[in-house]
Amino acid sequence: MAIFLDNLPVNLSEDIVLNADIEEKCRVVYRQHDDNGMNDSDAGERRTNTDDAGGISDYCFYDLWNPDTEYDDRCIIVPLRTTGVENVGFTPSAFSNMIGSKDDKNNDKNHPNVSWVMLLELNGIPVHSCGMDGRFYNPRDNRSLDDIFDDHGNLQKHFSCGGIIVGGRVCKEKENRKTASEVYLFPICTHHNVYSAVKGGGTGTGFYMKIGNVRRALKLQGYLRSAVVMSAISEQKARTD
Ligand SMILES: [Zn+2]
């Protein structure tokens, strides 16, 4: 079972606006890096950190916390204020969903997704429509695709934006990744969040996106140093023992 870790150092840019509801619901899941290829999609980018015990054990961004999901014991669940969140200009030529994006369709007003959207709004990032240009692009030939599969695997001709706006987690790459040194929270529609360019290929994957009229995003750091995490875990254990 994942560990809720509330005692990591605060790492929050001064201009970030939070409220109690966001503090409670907007938590981020990091997972201990392993050598089993979990993150091999970006092996070239990842910093190679070897801790004193000789293992590579950075904690990598894994997911925005969903209370309905079970996370394994390599995961830690941390408050937003420890993730180095920053309000930044966001104008990449291409960006894509992080692999693992899921379950953001929930329209329940108590669902944490609403809090992620509220967080964007509180920080001046417009959430009234999808931040994309309305299309999706093939990373192999850079052409705009007409056909896309919905989350039930049904072919949708002439794709368009639709559904609700969610706080999508994206990275500045054409190819979907499981981890990246920077992960961005950005307003996207359900279709851009969960549809796929490949039948049964997973939600939000197989295509990249281009910016529309939203030019800012909240940046989270993609990695937490294992030494810092380990010491916070032992401190927390010492307090509860
Ligand atoms: Zn959209």
Image (tube, helix red, strand yellow):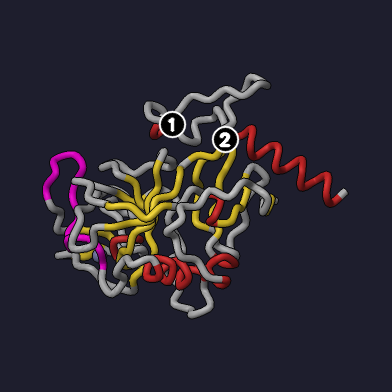
First in sequence: mark 1 vs mark 2:
1
Could you tell me which residue is drawn at 46 percent across and 42 percent down?
Answer: 222
Task: Kindly identify which numbered label has been placed on residue 40.
Answer: 1
Q: Which residues are magenta?
A: 130-143
Quadrant location, ligand no. 1: bottom left
Q: Quadrant of residue 133?
A: bottom left
Could you tell me which residue is drawn at 31 percent across and 64 percent down?
Answer: 188
Could you tell me which residue is drawn at 50 percent across and 52 percent down?
Answer: 12
Image side of residue 116 versus residue 228, left or right: left
Image side of residue 132 versus residue 15, left or right: left
The magenta stretch spans residue 45? no
Indicate the secondary structure of the residue bearing disc 2: loop
- From the viewer's side, name the closer residue of 78 and 124: 124
Q: Position of residue 152 (x, y in %)?
A: 36, 64
Q: Position of residue 158 (x, y in %)?
A: 14, 65
The magenta stretch spans residue 133? yes
- From the viewer's side, name the closer residue of 137 and 230: 230
User: Can I make out residue 202 in this image?
Assistant: no
Main SS class of the magenta portion in the image: loop
Could you tell me which residue is drawn at 83 percent across and 44 percent down?
Answer: 238
Q: Position of residue 63 (x, y in %)?
A: 50, 52
Location of residue 212 with respect to 219 vertically, above or below: below
Amino acid type of the residue tagged 1 in the rendering: Asp
Indicate the secondary structure of the residue bearing disc 1: helix
- From the viewer's side, name the closer residue of 37 and 224: 224
Which residue is identified by label 2? Answer: 225
Task: Judge depth for marks 1 and 2 and give the one in front.
Answer: 2
Location of residue 121 with respect to 148 vertically, above or below: below
Amino acid type of the residue tagged 2 in the rendering: Arg
